[in-house]
Each structure stands twice: as C-alpha cells, then as structure tokens.
Image (cartoon, helix red, strand yellow):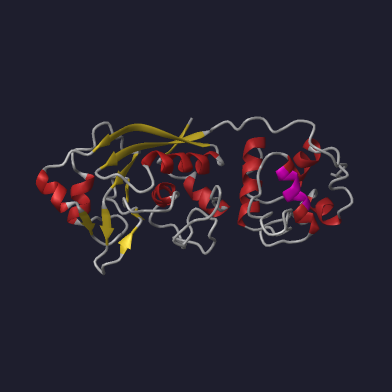
C-alpha cells in the first residue's frame, strides 16, 4: 500500500513500514519515528516524555511511543503489538490525510475490561486513598481497563490487633505472607470479596526483616489476591504499581524495569504522567484471570 498523506508519503522508512518491509518498532529513531509521534499528538494521544527535552517529538521509539502505538491499535481494532506496520500505517494515513490538523478527533475510548477492587484502611495514608485511586484509573484507562471499587471500609481492629499491626513486619515475598501480614489480610475485611477480586490494604508501616521500610507490597496468599500500601507512601502510583504486580503474577520477569516513566519502575518514584506499560507487560496483564472482560 502506498501512503498518500503528505505527512508520510515522502519518507521512505514510513513507506516501507506501510508494507511491513520492515515495520517500525521499539529501538528505532529518526524523522520517521518523529512523524509517527507527531501523528499521535495530533490525534490526542499525548507524548509528554518524548517531547519533554526539545518541546517537540524527539524521534526516539522508546517505551512511551510503544505504549501509544498499542493504545492506538486497541482503539482502532487493530492487532495490539506496539509495532508500526502495514495496518497501523494505513489507519494513520486514513485519519491524517493532510499535513494540517486531523479532520476529526479519535472517538472516545471505550473500556473493554475491568479490575474489581476492594479498599480497606487501618490508617490515613499520606497520599489519600482516592488520590491514588484516581491516578490508578488514569493509568489503566489508557489500556481500556476500568477500575471498579466494589467496597471500601475502615478495618475494625481490636486493641490488641491495633498494637500488633502498628508496624506490619515481614519480607515482601510472592505467594506467602508473614503472621502479621496474614492478620491484616484476614482482619474481618473479606465480606463480598470475590475470588478474582483484589483487596487493597492501607496499612501503617511496612517493614522487612532487615529493617527496610516499603511503600507497598504485593505479597499475598496464592488464593487471596491482595496488596498492602504503607501510610507513609509518597508515590501517587503506589496503588496502581502494586495492583499491577498482582496482575502480572509472581512468574513475570523482570519484576521491575529501569525506566522511571514505566509503572513498574525500580526507582522510588515512577515519573510517567500517566505512567505507561510495555507491550510485554500488557500481554501478561490481559492474560490475568483478575482482569474481567466487559
């Protein structure tokens, strides 16, 4: 297929991509990538990271660009592989027939899946629960995933339990919990929780055996999907990050990545606004039984 839009037609790499010979993928860079990034910007898919340094598309096909390709493909009903090949270029060529503004914006995104969440609190977090929830909703909505909070309540503890759970000790490990973590996750807070729902516990202090404190932990019993968020957590993405650990499951690697803007970043703060996920991460998320089709 020969491209017709003056945005793309004169670029040989884009013409080759329109024949998937070869397609354009993560790791590429140059004016052809910048043209694709600008197309997404004009269609309303923001590229905050890729435009941060120069104020315009940087032409680097990194994590953010891969994520936007996936989002565009999902909204257009195309194969969601994060690669710009024949079908993706054909749709861009159709939607952007001129070098000027697009004739019409993309249709509103329609959610295709949902996550069922239950929120439980034993302390008031530094970043309020509903602030973290709003950030989580924004992150997952990029991928047509809706976050449904089915129930929310303060956890009623006895004086003895309150004392015990003032600091929740135990290393953050997959598929197992410490006695204190088990006490928190069993503290009369499981009413109405389905087997494929995720419970988010806002605790006080999460401390590992070596004395290190954590912002959050996705360690839980195998049949009880749950995460714990420390009241002192300062990263607004903590809830979204820990829930994503559960969706990815204990077998997914790498657990964390060295991209600060990725939701599963290894840095203390994930800087994406909103944070993004890679195609590999998305493939695993969409295979999770905890993701419900609408």
In this view of the protein, which residue sits in the foreground, 6 or 91? 6
Q: Pinpoint residue 184: horizontal percent, then vertical percent.
A: 21, 47
Q: Is residue 77 magenta?
A: no
On screen, residue 152 versus residue 142, left or right, reads left
Q: Residue 44 occupies which quadrant of the picture?
A: top right
Task: Give the residue drawn at x 56%, y 53%.
Answer: 278
In this view of the protein, which residue sits in the foreground, 97 or 85? 97
- Which range of residues does the magenta coloring cover? 35-41
Q: Is residue 36 magenta?
A: yes
Which quarter of the rendering shows the N terminus?
top right
Task: Give the residue drawn at x 77%, y 45%.
Answer: 89
Count of numbered tags: 0
* Residue found at the very far bottom of the displayed protein: 210
Q: Pinpoint residue 291: horizontal percent, then vertical percent.
A: 44, 39
On screen, residue 180 versus residue 139, left or right, reads left
Q: Pinpoint residue 91: horizontal percent, then vertical percent.
A: 75, 39
Q: Is residue 161 visible?
A: yes
Task: Give the residue drawn at x 47%, y 62%.
Answer: 267
């Amino acid at each position: 297929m020969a491209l017709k839009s003056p945005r793309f037609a004169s670029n040989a790499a884009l013409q080759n991509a329109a024949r998937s010979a070869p397609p354009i993928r993560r790791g590429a860079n140059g004016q052809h990538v910048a043209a694709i990034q600008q197309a997404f910007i004009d269609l309303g898919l923001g590229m905050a990271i890729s435009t941060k340094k120069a104020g315009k598309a940087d032409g680097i096909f990194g994590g953010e660009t891969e994520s936007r390709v996936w989002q565009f493909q999902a909204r257009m009903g195309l194969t969601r592989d994060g690669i710009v090949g024949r079908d993706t270029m054909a749709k861009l060529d159709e939607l952007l027939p001129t070098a000027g503004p697009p004739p019409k914006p993309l249709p509103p995104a329609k959610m295709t899946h949902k996550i069922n969440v239950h929120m439980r609190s034993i302390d008031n977090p530094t970043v309020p629960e509903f602030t973290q929830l709003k950030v989580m909703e924004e992150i997952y909505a990029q991928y047509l995933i809706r976050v449904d909070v089915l129930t929310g309540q303060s956890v009623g503890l006895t004086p003895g339990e309150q004392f015990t759970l003032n600091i929740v000790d135990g290393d953050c490990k997959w598929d197992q919990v410490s006695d204190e973590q088990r006490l928190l996750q069993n503290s009369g807070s499981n009413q109405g929780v389905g087997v494929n729902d995720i419970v988010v516990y806002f605790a006080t202090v999460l401390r590992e055996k070596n004395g290190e404190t954590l912002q959050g932990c996705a360690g839980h019993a195998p049949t009880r999907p749950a995460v714990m968020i420390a009241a002192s957590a300062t990263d607004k993405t903590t809830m979204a990050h820990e829930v994503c650990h559960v969706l990815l499951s204990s077998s997914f690697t790498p657990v964390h990545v060295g991209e600060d803007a990725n939701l599963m970043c290894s840095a203390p703060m994930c800087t994406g606004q909103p944070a993004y996920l890679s195609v590999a991460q998305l493939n695993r998320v969409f295979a999770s039984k905890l993701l419900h089709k609408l």
